[in-house]
Image: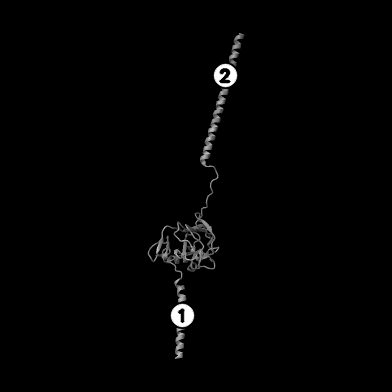
Amino acid sequence: MRKSLKKIVAVFAASSLALALAVGILPGVAEAVECSDAGKKAAKAELNVDTPEYHAYFGYQQQGTWTFRNAWYDPGAGLDGTFSSGVGDYNTLMTDGGNQVIEGPVITDAIIKGNGTYSVSLTNINGAIPADDGATNITSLIFVSTDIPSSAIGTINFSDFKLIVDGAEIPLPGGEPYVDADAEELGLYQFDVVNTYHKEAYTSPSILATNNSIEIQFTVSGFNVDDPDAVIAEPTEAPTEKPASSDAGSAASSGADDKSDSDEEGSSNTTTIIIVVVAAIVVIGGVVLVMRKKK
């Protein structure tokens, strides 16, 4: 009886251990990053350095509200994905697990056609995303997902990253973007400027609160061609010269003065000539009169 009891206990313990391991393993399997067919195709494609045309997509996630724009290769909520609720598309922000579209915000992606400086952004937010509170609502991801294969890492370089929130540049939490390991494992290149899941690089649980815009600027190099259109416009300084109207007025005034001076000079010259002519006539008349008297 005791031996049977021991066997039962041993079997129960082994079963419990197996169940515990299964529970611990299964979530990891469930959370594995999936990839769309288009993503798999891009990952296997040969890098084109001569006539490139790649895409950079703005990505975002806020915990708490679960407001997000997933990576383009996500099979459910990506570029070619279908939301379970049947609403929305990839050019919108989603919230509440994808059951609601946030109207108003504008997402701008970039087309990479060579070396240059590019920008992706989320604008016109107008308070549609609740402010971070560091506890419930936390900005956990701000990233750029591309269709450049991860085999390009080391050949194609991304540098000079800038994170601009509501028009003001703020330091990157990790100093440098984090090359997303999950995307790299899929064979695609993605860099995260904010990733609170990557604890080694990002220790702050909440790094920003935005009212209207989030922008990521970055410079791409390593292609054999430059993209002449890939230049971020710099603000121009106010002109220091006088307005054209003032110059025109001055010119008109100067012209009038010159004309006045010319008229005065002409009038003076005319008067002088008249006086000389009159004087000459008087002199000639005097000479004639004297000659007549002598005769």
The residue lying toward the viewer, choosing from 35 and 62, is 62
Q: Amino acid at mark 1?
A: Ala
Q: Earlier in the sequence, mark 1 or mark 2?
A: 1
Label 1 and label 2: CA atoms lie apart by 135 Å
| Most distant residue in the bottom direction | 1
What is the secondary structure assignment of the residue under circle 1? helix
Q: Secondary structure at mark 2?
A: helix
Q: Is residue 5 visible?
A: yes
Q: Nearer the viewer, residue 104 or 228?
A: 104
For the image, the number of numbered tags is 2
Coloured how?
A: one colour
Q: Badge 2 local density, few (<14 within 10 Å), some, or many (20+)?
A: few
In the rendered image, which residue does mark 2 sit on? 278
The image shows residue 112 at horizontal and vertical percentages of 48, 59
The vertical placement of 151 against 125, above or below, is below
Query: Which residue position holds label 1?
Result: 18
Question: Can you say whether 114 is above or below 270 in the image?
Answer: below
Q: Position of residue 224 (x, y in %)?
A: 52, 59
Residue 274 image-quadrant placement: top right
The mark closer to the camera, 1 or 2, is 1
Q: Residue at x 59, y 12 (%)?
A: 289
Give the x, y percent position of residue 125.
45, 58
| Disc 1 crowd, CA 10 A, few/some/many (<14, 14-19, 20+) | few
- Quadrant of the snapshot with the C terminus: top right
For image coordinates 60% across by 14% down, the residue present is 286
Instruction: Tell me if I can see residue 72 in this picture.
Output: no
Q: Position of residue 172 (x, y in %)?
A: 54, 61
**Amino acid type assigned to the residue bearing label 2 in the image:** Val
Seen as rendered, the residue at the extreme left is 86
Corner quadrant of residue 201: bottom right
Number of the label disc, if any, that sits on residue 82: none
Where's the N terminus, which quadrant?
bottom left
